[in-house]
Amino acid sequence: MSKQSGRGRVVGLPAWDRCAVMGVVNVTPDSFSDGGRWFDTAAAVKHGLALVAEGADLVDVGGESTRPGATRVDEAEELKRVIPVVRGLASEGVTVSVDTMRASVAAQSLAAGAALVNDVSGGLADPAMIPVVADAGAPFVVMHWRGFLEGGNVKGVYDDVVTEVVDELHARVEAVLAGGVSPDRIVVDPGLGFSKDAEHDLVLLAHLDRLLTLGHPLLVAASRKRFLGRVLAAAPEAAPPPARERDAATAAVSALAAYAGAWAVRVHEVRATADAVRVARAVEGARAAGNGAEGVR
């Protein structure tokens, strides 16, 4: 599969000629990265618009923290957090993704103007999710997921993490297709940090080409995650830097993912990643031009 096919068009969303940048708006008090900063609806909408001004192509709105150990919020609270923000951003012309595991939140978000459903469970957490997405004809992110993380980083044991993640994602995509979601509206996500240790995350990043063999656009969500903290720690036993000090490392991953052929990267701090994906695209274009020149000598 070529990089371009891996980065290919997702029907129902704008087309970009490079890796897209998905900015994150967490409407939660307990996100690992920026919990509470955008908990107010007006602040969340303002932040989403600021991310677009900094270069975000779409904005992912979530009302429930999925960090290891987080307790789930109830449906009414999630709806209260998410729907006004989705509506506010969509009314400003922003391409909005809703980050939810609940079919009811997905349905009401789509009705409020969201264009994409980003479900970290890939439809496993709520049996009604796939029918809702299929009936709406919405694009859908299918992430590799092995269960809720309320008890910590569960089921993070692999013999061959790349093969197992690819196989499990393939099985999940097949189930989503069987549920009626169109193949040209499916995006896959390896689920970095979900039931994975730092070593697993790094190996997956080193083998994004294997994930592209699934035949669907690829979303890479590495922003500020624990494995970057481990990489940046001064020594193996040293404390990792806090989440907000991992943005330069996130931009580095964004450049690598973009050059490998990712369709989009999901990040908290947009400006550096917006620059990174453009540089990756320019280098990719230069390589293609150089290959073409060699071919006509």
Image (cartoon, grey):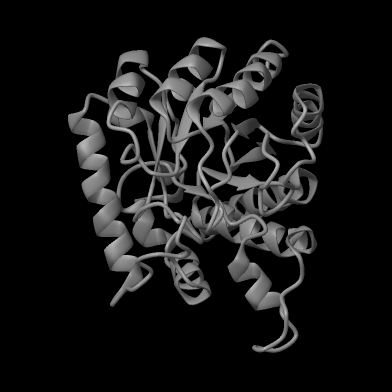
Between 132 and 94, the one nearer to me in the picture: 132
Residue, x 32% and y 60% (percent of image)?
165
Q: Is residue 179 above or below residue 264?
A: above
The answer, for residue 95, to whether it is visible in the render is no
Quarter holding residue 82 = top right
Residue 96, image quadrant:
top right
Residue 20 placement: quadrant:
top right
Nearest the eye: 285 or 143: 143
Q: Residue at x 47, y 57 (%)?
A: 295
Image: 21 above or below 85: below
Residue 280 point in image, percent of width and height: 65, 54
Counting from the top left corner in percent of width and height, residue 194 is at 46, 58
Relative to 290, say whether 186 is above or below.
Answer: above
Q: Is residue 65 above or below residue 243?
A: above
The percent coordinates of residue 249 (x first, y second) are 71, 65
Q: Is residue 173 visible?
A: yes
Q: Position of residue 23 (x, y in %)?
A: 67, 39
